Amino acid sequence: MAGKNARDAETKAIIGHLPSILRRDHVIAAYAPLSSEPGFPGLVAAVISICGTALLPIARTSADGVPLALQWARYRTGPLVAAPYGLFEPPPPWLPPSALGSARTVLVPALAVDRHGVRLGRGAGFYDRSLAFRDPAARLIAVVRDEELVDELPVEPHDVAMTHALTPGYGLISLT
């Protein structure tokens, strides 16, 4: 999809699926989408309106530039602050990577995901390093456009499979 009207329609559709996916009594890990990603700009506000709070990621690197496992911040409402990589995040205090283990559902940004759960990210490896801290029973939901749900992607040994994909047109899809 291209253009502001198409992006707005994608966001509206993604947000429209959330009430059937999320539960108020569950901890949800989400993210603030970039302007080029489905869900921009309303995804976080929609998650908060349903769940009351969410964990949002904090991406940092080591002193020598190696991506670290994501830290997390409990977020309710209020402005997000500009962060590295063009991202937006809550201000401190931040929680350690292990905080992800409390989430029942993890919404994960993706450039594509295949029907086997292989996710293509931006290549830095923040989520690959972080998903080891998840609850093994948590749903891992890649948020993608309809055309970004593909039949097959190359898989690497460190890849953590997504359990679901969420697209504007198809809604929530179980992956195998």
Image: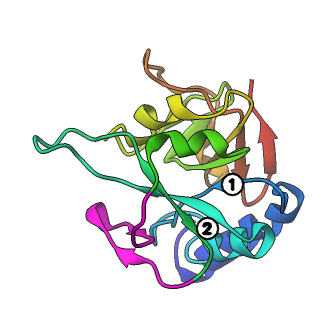
What is the three-letter code of the residue carrying label 2? Answer: Gly
Mark closest to the chain's N terminus, 1 or 2: 1
Mark 1, residue position: 28
How many residues crowd around disc 1 within 10 Å: few (fewer than 14), some, or many (20 or more)?
many
Question: Is-magenta flag for residue 172?
Answer: no
Circle 2 SS class:
loop
124 up-or-down from 169: above or below:
above
Position in image of residue 104 (x %, y %): 73, 44
Residue at the spot of label 2? 39
Q: Nearer the viewer, residue 97 or 119?
A: 97
Check the image and tell me how it is coloured.
Answer: rainbow
Distance between mark 1 and mark 2 Cα atoms: 16 Å
Q: Tell me the quarter of the picture where residue 28 sits.
A: bottom right
- Tell me which corner region of the image, top left, top right, bottom left or bottom right, holds residue 21: bottom right
Circle 1: residue type? Ile
Q: Is residue 112 above or below residue 169?
A: above
In the image as oriented, which residue stretches furthest toward the left? 64
Q: Which residues are magenta?
A: 78-94
Q: From this view, report whether residue 4 is shown above or below residue 69.
A: below
Residue at 38% x, 42% y is 126
